[in-house]
Image (cartoon, rainbow, N blue to C red):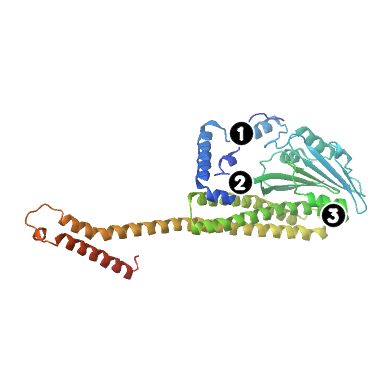
Amino acid sequence: MKNEKKTFKPEKLLEPFKPDNLIHALKNPDEVLKKSLRGLTNITGSITGIDFNFYSKIKSEAKGKSELTFIGEKKMEEVQLQLFTYNAERCDESMNLDDYIRIQKDDTENNYWLNLHGIHDVNLMENIGKSLALERLTIRHLIDTTQRPKVDDYDDYIFFSVKSILKDESQQLKIEQLSFVLGKNYVISFQEEVGDHFDHIRTKLRDNLGLIRKRECDFLLFQLLDAILDNYFETLDFINHEVTLIEKETITNPKQSTLLLIEKNKKDVDKIKKSLSPFKEALTNIMKDRTHFIDKKNRKYFRDLKNSCTNAIEEANATYAALESLTNIYFSSLSQKMNETMKVLTTVATIFIPLTFIAGVYGMNFENMPELKWKYGYFGVWVIMFLVLVAMIIFFKRKKWL
């Protein structure tokens, strides 16, 4: 189903800014604030002008009509398909759009990996489902990009969906849903767009590197999931590098743009945590249910994958805690700078209070003031004022107020 209506993506409006370079953002706070205010204006305008429940309405309408509907952002025009037919001795590769019909579920000699880029073609997804006897609910889930990561165990296959998170060229989080169907002798992977998540796996298949061609398809699924998890670690490493730069800026010269960077990264880490938790939950379900599609000798790999997922969650929590600390340091630094400023102003004001008093006394217009007729009265007042100034400065120095 093609939807020409311009869809609203609230996560884009919620981004404070999109700096091309962190250093550039820190050195150009005015530009950052301008972009942030523009984003705030967009949010304010969207409250009255755009329907936040757009996707929810599409889902409700599709369920009401009992028809399959693509729900999400169309990220490419033409669907691309790639089929690997392999065993320990050979590997064939083809890219015709109807190659999915070549998958033989009762083939005991070959394994199949069918990879699709683009899931918006509902008719193609439905035909693939019919060819491989996939449940209609499975097709509904894989063309709905708003689904929470999950795993469903059916009689003839496992359906597995996760979120992949990477930083794009503008340093924004790029979130993509990836779904997998694991059968006895095949794996089907569904990607929203062309990406390089699995390039190294394709190389291993072509050049017969590693164990992929020597093992069953569950090992290939492990490799695919491991590649996605690597994306999380890569993104967290990038954010941690940003946190290091932000920390230096927060301590030495905190600005409003620094706070915006902190809050942006906190939101990014929060998205990663929310994606990793169901990922781990799905892996736990696989290990708990003891599905017959995961070979006993390959369960250790999925157990290791679950442990890596736990490590990623712990790293995300540590990064979020570091960003929370930077927020506290930022406000403490601002408070300290304000205290220093108030200290200087108070000291200057205190020094000039007695001098102002002296000048005020001798500025009064009384005729019977003794010092008015004195020859050295004017110079005497200056000497007294100077001595008072020096005495107060010495006093403040001894008290360590200066």
Mark identifier at residue 54: 1
Report the mark closest to the observer, 3 or 1: 3
Q: Secondary structure at mark 1?
A: helix
Residue at left offset 71%, top offset 30%: 2
Nearer to the camera, 80 or 57: 80
Residue at left offset 75%, top offset 49%: 197
Q: Secondary structure at mark 2?
A: loop
Q: Are marks 2 and 3 in contact (CB under 8 Å)?
A: no
Other-residue count near label 2 (Cα within 10 Å), few / some / many at <14 / 14–19 / ≥20:
few
Q: Which residue is mark 2?
A: 20
First in sequence: mark 3 or mark 1? 1
Real-space CA distance between mark 2 and mark 3, rounded to the nearest whole angstrom: 39 Å
Residue at left offset 63%, top offset 59%: 315
Residue 229 position, x and y percent, is 71, 54
- Could you tell me which quadrant the C terminus lies in? bottom left
- State the image quarter where residue 121 is shown: top right
Report the mark closest to the observer, 1 or 2: 2
Report the mark closest to the observer, 2 or 3: 2
Nearer to the camera, 38 or 293: 38
Mark identifier at residue 212: 3
Given the image, on which type of amino acid does mark 2 rest? Asp
Given the image, on which type of amino acid does mark 1 rest? Phe
Real-space CA distance between mark 3 and mark 1, rounded to the nearest whole angstrom: 42 Å
Q: Secondary structure at mark 3?
A: helix
Q: Are marks 3 and 1 in contact (CB under 8 Å)?
A: no
- Could you tell me which quadrant the N terminus lies in? top right
Given the image, on which type of amino acid does mark 3 rest? Ile
Residue 155 position, x and y percent, is 81, 46
